[in-house]
Image: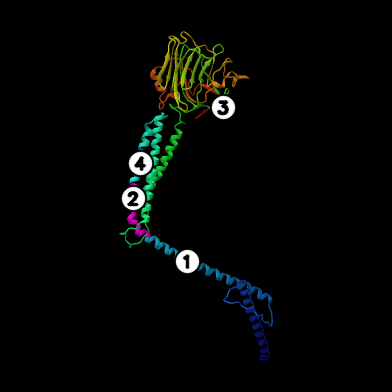
Amino acid sequence: MVWWRIPEAAFLLYVCACVTLAYEDDIEIQYSDYYNEISDGETPAPTPSSTPCNSPDLTKWDKIFSMMENSQMRENMLLQYVDDIVKVEMGTLRGDLQRFIAEYERSCGAAVETAGRRMVLQLESHLRETLELLKLSDLTPTAGNFNHLEAQIQQLLSAEHTQTSRLAKLESSCLSSRSTGASKNGLHLQEVTPEEVALDEVLAAMQEVKAELDEELKSRQRRLPAGCEMALLFPMRSRRIYTAIIPDVPLALSAFTVCMWVKPTSVFNKTVLFSYGHRRNPSEIQLLLAQTSAVFTVGEEASQVEARSVVSPGQWIHLCGAWSSEQGLATLWVGGKKMASKPGMAKGHNLPEGGSLQLGQERNGCCPLSPTSGSGVAGFEGSFDPKLAFAGKMTGVNMWDTVLSEQEISQLAAQRGQGCQHRGSMVAWGVTEMVPHGGAQFIY
């Protein structure tokens, strides 16, 4: 039985030897096919060896396994190489930074700190001056105050640029020159000092204040005077743009005072602000602008009171017209000051009721506006002249059935006061119904 097993074992050894030789030949061929390694000379094409036996399935999977192993090995080698390079370069950079900081930190630290403190003190001084000017200036500045404020802002910006340039020069000088007395021992990375943190905070605060000042300059012209919270906007001159006032009581008056704040966009030969009239006389009461003059008429347009060179387009101005039938005295007030008066104007005359009252236009020969009329009948705007229309803003429109005193009018004209809280007895701003037409609208 043992002798029978000997030929079997010899045959199995022979088969295994054949498989091993075929596997080695395939692996060598796979290397030359996929990796194409370059040698010093040309490599002759391998001579295929004859294999006594062939096993296709086993050879295919062995090739794939060998390729994966070789690929993984090469990838690991590349990663290790990159990691070594990064470590070496980072170590070199760290050493350079430590040497740089050790050489320059002592020579530049004191100079930068001194320059930063000086810059902070100067800029804080300019900021205090500008803020004080803003607090003390009027809500709507005159041309001189506005120019002075603008000059202060420009001076602040110039100081900021100057100090920034000085600091940049100082840093450049520190970077370009070496300090001979710098210590070379104790290399360490410099941390952010409290002075640098404080300087950054001051610079950030300066930028915020600058933004607030710019916004302040832009919003000064948008703010409303005398504590008013809303205004009427007349965007352009048009016969369709006006505001009708519907009083709660008829305007049968023998004395009155009418006041308002106006900010005209532009002024022409005749611009109507306040107008009351009826069929027989469309000009019973008129408060007008004519170029740079303010005009007040009662009874008829030929009798008027005029204050010259008091109107500036784009600036808020307070106007009051007062009249008494007993003496026929008409007075025109501008900015809380009596600018012109005329006795004997419509003396003994009483204003008739049943007329129409409007802002920004003058009505000529049309039916009075009733509370239920809405926008009126067809052709309602036909009685308006676009050349008389007002363009701009208007607020604080009030009318009393008496002649106000000089002190009362001065309080109404105070820009930082609360004139809008003192409402009229006949027309009260914010209480009496006012109906905008066309493009007129309330703004807040």
* Badge 1 or badge 3: first in the primary sequence: 1
Where residue 39 appears, as percent x and y from the top left, is: 57, 75
Q: Earlier in the sequence, mark 4 or mark 1?
A: 1
Q: Position of residue 218 (x, y in %)?
A: 46, 34
Residue 376 appears anywhere in the view: no
Q: Residue furthest bottom?
A: 3
Question: Going 43% across and 17% down the picture, which residue do you hit?
Answer: 332
Q: Is residue 101 magenta?
A: yes
- Where is mark 2, residue-wise? 113
Amino acid under disc 2: Glu
- Of labels 3 and 4, earlier in sequence is 4
CB under 8 Å between discs 1 and 3: no
Residue type beneath disc 3: Gly
**Residue 320 visible to the viewer:** yes
Q: Considering the image in quadrants, where does the N terminus appear?
A: bottom right
Q: Which residue matches tag 3?
A: 439
- Would you name the residue on which mark 1 appears? 85
Q: Is residue 443 left or right of residue 180?
A: right
Spatial separation of the CA atoms under disc 3 and disc 2: 60 Å
Would you say the residues marked 3 and 4 are in contact, meaning their CB atoms lie under 8 Å apart?
Answer: no
Residue at numbered disc 4 = 124
- Left or right: where 101 falls relative to 10: left
- Crowd tier of the residue under label 4, counting other residues whose Cα lies within 10 Å: few below 14, some 14–19, many 20 or above: some
Magenta-drawn stretch, dominant element (helix, strand or loop): helix
Please report the bounds of the magenta region as a residue range. Answer: 100-117
Total of numbered circles in the picture?
Answer: 4
Residue in view at x 33 percent, y 43 percent:
121
Quadrant in the picture for residue 127: top left
